[in-house]
Image (spheres, rainbow, N blue to C red):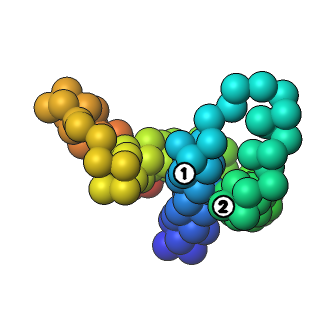
């Protein structure tokens, strides 16, 4: 159970960081190199970098402690949480095929953990 919790925290931080980046980029799209520099001055962009960095540190810990063949597939929950964030936060439309794909990802991850 600890393995699942560690990877879950990693995935939540990873997706949260990317959501912050999406918010920052929606406020200020990159149009030039100067735009890129000013983008990194936005607090939400910096928060995203911090969250992504914390996720990476947790991932390093997980890689050192658990079998890669078991934890790496659990990272696929980032796809699920990312899609849910897109739907809930950014009001993105989702197709039946996308939903089916998300269900298959969850099912596959469940099977990997059970082995």
Q: Quadrant of residue 53?
A: bottom right
Q: Secondary structure at mark 2?
A: helix
Q: Nearer the viewer, residue 49 or 61?
A: 49
* Residue 1 image offset from top left, x and y in percent: 49, 73
Left or right: residue 6 versus residue 87 is: right
Q: Quadrant of residue 83?
A: top left
Question: Would you name the residue on which mark 2 appears?
Answer: 44
Q: Nearer the viewer, residue 60 or 26?
A: 26
The residues tagged by marks 1 and 2 sit, at their Cα atoms, a distance apart of 7 Å
Residue at 57% over, 47% down: 27
Q: Secondary structure at mark 1?
A: helix
Placement of 42 over or under 25, stated as above or below = below
Residue at 84% over, 28% down: 33
Residue at 66% over, 61% down: 44
Mark 1, other Cα within 10 Å: few <14 / some 14–19 / many ≥20:
some
Mark 2, other Cα within 10 Å: few <14 / some 14–19 / many ≥20:
some
Q: Residue furthest left?
A: 96
Left or right: residue 33 versus residue 5 is: right
Left or right: residue 41 versus residue 68 is: right
Left or right: residue 61 versus residue 48 is: right
* Residue 52 image offset from top left, x and y in percent: 70, 55
* Residue 72 image offset from top left, x and y in percent: 59, 44
Placement of 2 over or under 40, stated as above or below = below
Residue 90 appears in view: yes
Question: Would you name the residue on which mark 1 appears?
Answer: 23
Placement of 82 over or under 51, stated as above or below = above
CB under 8 Å between discs 1 and 2? yes
């Amino acid at each position: 159970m600890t393995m699942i919790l560690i990877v879950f925290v990693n995935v939540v931080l990873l997706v949260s960081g990317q959501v912050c980046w999406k918010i920052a980029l929606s406020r200020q799209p990159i149009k030039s190199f100067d735009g890129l520099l000013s983008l990194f001055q936005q607090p939400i962009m910096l928060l995203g970098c911090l969250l992504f960095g914390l996720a990476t540190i947790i991932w390093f810990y997980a890689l050192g402690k658990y079998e890669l063949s078991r934890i790496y597939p659990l990272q696929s929950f980032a796809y699920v949480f990312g899609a849910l964030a897109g739907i809930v936060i950014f009001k993105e439309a989702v197709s039946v095929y996308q939903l089916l794909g998300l269900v298959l990802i969850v099912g596959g991850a469940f099977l990997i953990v059970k082995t």
